[in-house]
Image (cartoon, helix red, strand yellow):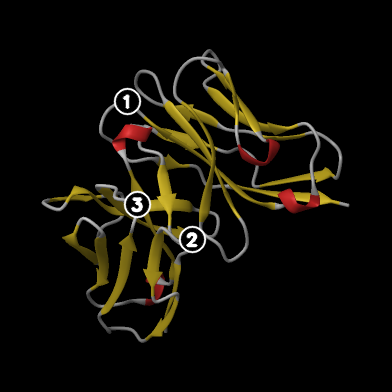
Amino acid sequence: DADVTQTPRNRITKTGKRIMLECSQTKGHDRMYWYRQDPGLGLRLIYYSFDVKDINKGEISDGYSVSRQAQAKFSLSLESAIPNQTALYFCATSDPGTSNTQYFGPGTRLTVL
Amino acid sequence: AQSVAQPEDQVNVAEGNPLTVKCTYSVSGNPYLFWYVQYPNRGLQFLLKYITGDNLVKGSYGFEAEFNKSQTSFHLKKPSALVSDSALYFCAVRDRGNTPLVFGKGTRLSVIA
């Protein structure tokens, strides 16, 4: 969905490196989310933010941090990447006025060697 | 706590036959229920949702889903499958409070010509 963009789309890095994944949206939604997808495990929530001043941990926040720089921007950082953080990462946005229907970006494929 | 179960990792169906992808859920109170589809190398696309009202919900691409409160199910259906329907399908649930979606592990649908 072009309304939600993620950069980079692919990234290969080494163990111990700090990595930032960025998400931008033009949907005007207040709520933003970061998920990771692993085969057979579905999508698991890492962090979410209901507005610029609100940050909440999700199911699997250890090893990750986030920054909500503006309504339209929500970044995910891996402080010191490890191989089991190799996954597909998705950003999503939602508007409570639409029963919180979430709209997803195209994903970032991260490989940690 | 909210949870979703998709009991089938894989569903195979012949083109032109009806398809069903199963989903059961657990949530406190009345649920919001969603189906998303993921095509290869793409993000998740919203298909349909149940909020209230008619138990049969119609969505994109000819898909529909039936909400069954007594069985806590929300199965995805289509009367006549297309090869292009082959993808990964996710069911998701949230309660009526301020909570993010919880996703199932996904079901891979394969439609065979």
Sequence order check, earlier mark of 2 and 3? 3
Residue at image point 11% right, 51% down: A53
Q: Are the residues flagged by discs 2 and 1 from a single subunit?
A: no
Task: Find numbered disc 2 in the image and state the secondary structure of the residue it sits on.
Answer: strand
Residue located 36% across and 32% down the image: A99
Q: In this picture, is A65 found above or below A47? A: below
User: Where in the figure is residue A110, as x and y percent of width and height?
Assistant: 42, 75
Which residue bears the numbered disc 3? Answer: A27
Do marks 2 and 3 share a chain? Answer: yes
Picture coordinates of residue A85 (x, y %)? 38, 70
Q: Nearer the viewer, mark 2 or mark 3?
A: 3
Amino acid type shown at disc 2: Asp
What is the spatial separation of the Cα atoms under label 3 and label 1, in whole angstroms? 23 Å
Where does the image place residue B24, in percent across and percent down from the top left? 54, 29
- The numbered mark 1 sits on a residue in which chain? B
SS class of the residue under badge 3?
loop
Is residue A21 depicted above or below A42 in this figure? below
* Residue located beneath label 2 in the image: A38
> Which mark lies nearer to you, 2 or 1?
1
Three-letter residue code for mark 3? Lys
Say which chain tag 2 marks. A
Q: Kindly identify the amino acid type of the residue bearing the numbered disc 1.
A: Arg
* Left or right placement of residue A110 versus residue B54 in this view: left
Residue A47, position as x, y percentages in the image: 26, 54
Mark pair 2, 3: CA separation? 27 Å
Residue on which disc 1 sits: B96
The reply to whether the C-beta atoms of the residues labelled 2 and 3 are less than 8 Å apart is no
Nearer to us in this view, B46 or A16: B46
Residue occupying image coordinates x 39% and y 65% = A5
